[in-house]
Amino acid sequence: MTITGAHQEGTGPTTRTWLWWGRRRSVALDVGLGLVSAFECALEGVRFAEKTAFPIPLGVLFGLIAGSTLLIRRRWPIAVVLVSIAITPAEMGFLLTVVGLYTLAASDVPRRIVATLAGMSLVATLIVSLVRVRQDVHSQELGDPGVWYVPAMAGFMAVGLTMPPVLFGLYIGARRRLMESLRERADSLEQELSLLADRAEQRAQWARTEERTRIAREMHDVVAHRVSLMVVHAAALQAVALKDPAKAVKNAALVGDMGRQALTELREMLGVLRASDGEQHRSAAVPLAAVGAAAAAAAAAAAEDGPCIADVEDLVGQSRQAGMVVELAVQGEAREYAPEVEQTAYRVIQEALTNVHKHAAGAKVRVRIAHRDAEVAMQVENGAPDTGSDPAVAGLPSGGNGLVGMRERVHALGGVFVSGPTDAGGFRVSAVLADRSAAEPAAELVAESAAESAAESGTRPGAEPDGESGAEPAPEPVAKPGDHGPRCGSG
């Protein structure tokens, strides 16, 4: 949901038109009421001048001035009511009193001031009504109408003239304030919805970026390792083609196997991407949910069908067939881990061996895997490269993304990754991954604590504190003990 600038500022073409017409109508109403009130007070000024032996022109002028104050009722309602109270003894300003009290009660003037002025107007009207009714009773010689007749009639006239406009004004003012509060609330809700929509779009974009990064990492791991081995075998094939035909045939068969395996893994990955893309198109009405479902489906499929730690031995065997001297050492009792841990451990070793093929041809390599109580550790260390190795083999291209991808994989699972050169001139890659299945009983408590901490600090759980990655790692599902069946792929 998006809000245009015109609606956000409340100054769209339609809104401006309605405001213009509303102001015109208000001005016309005030002018009309002011003219009627001035005419009424002018007529009553003539009668007042006749009763008090006051010059009639001055009485008319006084009435016109007093009645015209109704023009300023919206800006200064207190002044209008005070004028109406002041001219009450002259029996002038009926319309001025009624409209002035209504405007005062409907305005934002404090209620104590409204009550005070309304009481003053009531008392003034009551006094004038008492005198007027008493005069009428004596002039018409109605006899003795009773003790309560004059006060009752005067009170009825005073209350009837003062209370209805005050009560109606209080009702209109309360209704106006309610409408304004509802309008402000609607505007705030609309802005909140806009912010939520923007945040959802940002999260969707983040999910797409994370999925693209994951896909690029998988493509790099699959293609780089297989193609690197193919280049190594092709170089060896070129070197022994004339000297040892049998070995050349063997190397050619290995190159073919490597190519077929690479194509198979690429087809599987593209199949997952097509399925995820179709699911996203079917859920086009909810972009964020579609992106999240597609990302989760792709990640789950990759974890289910991906390689595992048990395939490391075959991986080492392929490097040995390419002429690399590799020593594999496994410590501790091997066991099954969560699929994402198995796949990450395999990819780290695979990428480390690929880097040795690229940058340290002819070097001896030691691969170590340690199964500990609550974690699995792996280390790939190579010696100094052989200076007498075939230059064709050593000329493999490098994109510089291998170490970055390994670090992202390990950090996404909350592990530790360290890499760097050794004193002997080689290179060492080490990683430690926690056994996520062992922490399954406390997973719910940890998730609740992370959510509470994120709510207090204003950040989402899963963000990297050291700032090594610009995007937050996607939340990893907690594996259950019964979900770790034989899921290893071909590697």
Image (cartoon, grey):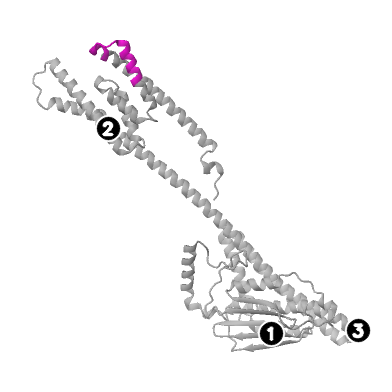
Which x, y percent locates residue 443? 49, 74
The 10 Å Cα crowd at callout 1, few under 14, some 14 to 19, many 20 or more, is many
Marked residue nearer the N-terminal end (3 or 1): 3
Which segment is the magenta one? Answer: 48-66
Residue drawn 57% across and 74% down? 414
Q: Nearer the viewer, residue 289 or 218?
A: 218
The answer to whether 37 is drawn above or below residue 185 in the figure is: above
Quarter where residue 45 is shown = top left
**Residue 79 on image: x %, y %:** 34, 28
SS of the residue under disc 2: helix
Residue 347 visible: no
Residue at (67, 88) in percent of width and height: 329
Which residue is label 2 attached to? 118
Instruction: Using residue 302 as the reference point, say whether residue 129 is left or right of it.
Output: left
- The reply to whether dot 3 and dot 1 touch (C-beta < 8 Å) is no
The spot of residue 456 in percent (x, y) is: 47, 63
Distance between the alpha carbons at the discs numbered 3 and 2: 117 Å
Question: What is the CA distance from the residue labelled 2 to the residue labelled 1?
Answer: 95 Å
- Residue type at numbered disc 2: Ala
Mark 3 sits on what residue? Answer: 242
